[in-house]
Image (cartoon, rainbow, N blue to C red):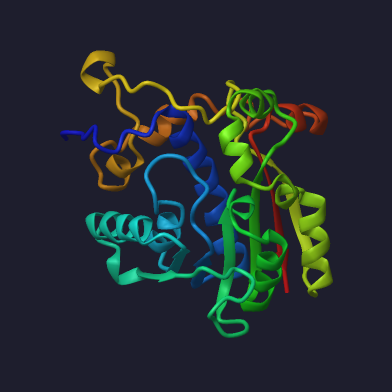
Amino acid sequence: MEKSEAYDEGLGTVYERFILNQILKRIKSDFGITSVLEVPHYGMTGVEGLNSVVLAAEGCDVTVVDWDEGRLATVRSVWKELKLSHKLSVRKVVDYGSLPFADRSYDLAWNFAALWHVKNGFALVEEMCRVASKTVFICVPNRIQPGYLVRKMVDRRFFKAVDEKFIDLQAIKSRLIKNGLRIVEEGFFDIPPWPDTCLPIKKVTGAKRGWNWSIIDYYKGRDPELERKVGRYAFMENTPLPKALQSLWAHHRYVIARK
């Protein structure tokens, strides 16, 4: 099938997505998730709005929250293209210390590397605890891996716009426990053989380089071999590495808590 370069995100982001998808599918199965709140969705590089697509494809109803109308428009557009609009609701929210949702209104509340983009990430954690009926899942960047440290030195504008205290996993866990949740799992993930800088990379067209990394093409059946191709780079992910080594190389950390 013909593939499109319009949604080429690069190997690093697509690798990240497939590994995250594995965790999300496991959470859905383990906790019986049918309704999902992703709040906010901003945090992943690449095409906006794809983080919870795998849960919708597995049958969940998904609400995606963001503060930017332009990003929400992109979410609607992408989900329409994937023929998943019937599983999607979007909501613009500005105050993340007071979410406009009832207590226990979603089975799962989660986000990916999003807490440090909001004004008070810890208040958002507490709100996620309130609106979740079963599970809270939070991912944060790993602050001690080499690529993160490189980015911090060269991308000062980005780090002025975020607040690193909101990606302190120990502090996040304390808020989860304080709000009556039990930590059931935590760990490291996204462990490819390259460091993670998230720095802009000059785009080279697929025609020139001979390959295309688009999870949208995978979802649409245009590139069914993509997961297998990306999986070639997961040898560190799939090996029981010592925790000390994981902590030095993994791009992200996560915690899963339940009520």
Foreground: 34 or 120? 120
* Tally of marks: 0
User: Which quadrant of the figure has residue 32?
Assistant: bottom right
Foreground: 90 or 194? 90
Q: Position of residue 200 (x, y in %)?
A: 45, 27
Q: Is residue 31 left or right of residue 80?
A: right
Quarter in which the C terminus is drawn? bottom right
Foreground: 60 or 143? 143
Q: Name the residue: 66% across, 73% down.
A: 127
User: Which quadrant of the figure has residue 225?
Assistant: top left
Q: Is residue 197 left or right of residue 127?
A: left
Q: Name the residue: 62% across, 68% down.
A: 31
Q: Is residue 144 above or below residue 55?
A: above
Quarter in which the N terminus is drawn? top left
Q: Is residue 77 left or right of residue 30?
A: left
User: Which quadrant of the figure has residue 115?
Assistant: bottom right
